[in-house]
Image (cartoon, helix red, strand yellow):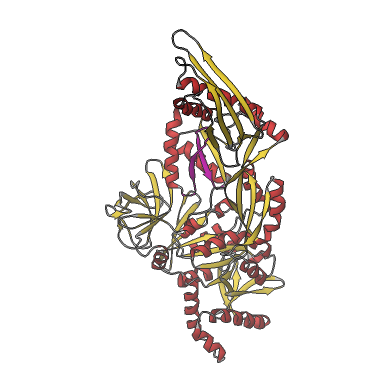
Amino acid sequence: MRCVTVMGPSQSGKSELIRKLAALDGHPAKSETAGPLTLTRFTYLDEPWCALDLAGGPEYARMAARPLLASDAVVLCVAADPDEAVLAAPYLRAIEASGTPCLIFINRIDAAKGRIRDVVAALQAYTGHTIVLRQIPIREDGRIVGAVDLISERAWRYRDGQSSVLVELPQSEADREHEARAALLEHMSEYDDALLEELIEEHEPATGALYQIAQRETADSVLMPAFLGAAAHMSGVTRLMKALRHETPQVDALRARLDPKALAVGFDAEVRKHLGKCVLLRALADGVAVGKPLGGANLGGLAEIGGKAGLDRLDAGDVGLSVKSDHLNAGQLFTATAATPVPAWAQGCPPAMRRVVTPAHERDEVRLSAALARLAEADPMLSISQDEETGHATLGVQGPMHLRQVLAMLADDFGVEVAAHVPLPQYRETISAQHEETYRHRKQSGGAGQFADVHIAIRPHGRGDGFAFAETVKGGAVPRNYIPAVEEGAREAMARGPLGFPVTDVSVMLMDGKHHAVDSSDFAFRTAGKMALREALAKAGPVLLQPIQAVTVHVPSVHSGAMVSLMSGLGGQVLGFDRDPDFRGWDEFRALLPLAAMDDLATALGSSTQGCAWAESRFDHYEEVYGREADRISRERLSA
């Protein structure tokens, strides 16, 4: 079995293309959906195929690498519109990073909004691999009615809903065909010395030899052939399928690309009722069988993609579900004895948004934790962490659709209803002035009392230096054994300052104090230290601090200009941008942005870049917040 992923932007017609490809042989196809992936198994000329359809939309474009783990080749389905080429940029990036052989299908050419060569040129701006037209359109009265194959030089006329019919090459297209064919052969000769020799000597290359060269250069990912058609009308579908049949490599090439020792790859997973965790496996070699070692333990069971039991083995190239094998996870390569992470290109983008989730009923707290752990095992694009402020679980997801999918699975598969909300930024506070404070703790309640007197001085510490404690006590005014208790009390006071947030970047000096031979104790000095610092903080000019993230936005160059106003509108500071050294047509845009604006950034990137850009961030520093905004944040905190 050979596996091909068909991917592309929303409304590019990729799902329709798969249906038409699967119907060519006249035999019924089998389709099953697993999360954002739809798997369709069919035959063509008695050979088994599996087509993987990745759901369209910006956040699923961020997951484009997932199905490529199981793909011998990929068909990138794009619209016949140069202005929409940028929508294919995230897919081209993932394809190039993975090294997967790619064929481009320019769909809906019956409603083309530009010249085909302009579409190819626009796509070429986003890949370092050379895109070559393998067909040119035949036009009549301004309409595209067929295509000419540039290798065989045969012309085909489209018939609505039927296979194309062979026709004579129109004389009006002869000059254009010769020009396009010469360009194709020139590109092919760059990677084939024998063909280059023939062209220099002005010999006509044999058609069969040209197809062999095309097959090798597609498999080696040095060229991306582009085909034309309109899947809804069956136009060009047969020619595309023939190209896939001849130019898609066998599973051995995928194994060599991923890990020559691997037996299988887990490229996706889901949790199903009555079956538990099911991992989608692609066998990369023979030896994947029930009861045999895989990933360090015996494989518990296998099922067909639809969940039907009865499989006892997967031959090389086959796709199936592992069941009763909790040691296997998606996003892993499996030998008989070990499981290793997939290559970095397949691990996807960092989360675009985060949400704190709380159970609707307190009794479900433990069930929620267990359910999230199971979902994280099944979905490599989902991350689970803990909110520092509340201790609740925090989900890292790729976007709103991914979030809805996770929440639906929690409700339907685990019976846990949850509420999701945006996590609060980790605000801090510090001081802006020096201050000295004396505090006496005295309490008498019968028997031994409590007595401690401390005199402290506080001052602002360097940004990011945290808490510092020192002492200059002389003459034993505060006995040495009680000084650690004063520091402990001061640290306790740092947990919540006068503005309602943890305090940082404060230096505390214990200067003097008094003690009582009977009533003093560690507890008394800890209390005195805590209360002294608490009162001092309120008098030392408290200042609110907000966390600032260092953000790198990976954005198609055509949208880089919009990043300046976008970042400024979110209260960020633009640092600059550079060309991405690894991916053509992409920039790396750098800025500093308040953590509170990160959720807005995900939304803004979607609207200003047509969903093509994505960001990664890390904590950089804390920055002061003044005025009404600081007052508002503090009031909300103190009233919570």
- In the picture, which quadrant includes the N terminus? bottom left
In the image, is residue 82 above or below residue 37?
A: below
Q: Give percent across and percent down for residue 611.
A: 62, 53
In the image, is residue 46 above or below residue 188?
A: above
Decide which of 416, 177 is in the foreground and name it: 416
Decide which of 452, 155 is in the foreground and name it: 452
Residue 258 in the figure: left or right of residue 336: right
Q: Give percent across and percent down for residue 615.
A: 59, 52
Residue 168: tell me if it is visible.
Answer: no
Q: Give percent across and percent down for residue 482.
A: 46, 25
Residue 351 in the figure: left or right of residue 627: left
Decide which of 588, 611 is in the foreground and name it: 588
- In the picture, which quadrant includes the C terminus? top right
Range drawn in magenta? 380-398
- Residue at the spot 50% in from the left edge and 19% down from the top edge: 515
In the image, is residue 639 above or below residue 29?
A: above
Q: Give percent across and percent down for residue 557.
A: 66, 61
Q: How many marks?
A: 0
In the image, is residue 536 above or below residue 106?
A: above
Extreme residue toward the bottom, this view: 201
Extreme residue toward the left, this view: 291
Q: Is residue 203 magenta?
A: no
Q: Quadrant of residue 511?
A: top right
Residue 590: tell me if it is visible.
Answer: yes
Extreme residue toward the top, this view: 446
Q: Is residue 396 magenta?
A: yes
Decide which of 138, 37 is in the foreground and name it: 37
Q: Quadrant of residue 283?
A: bottom left
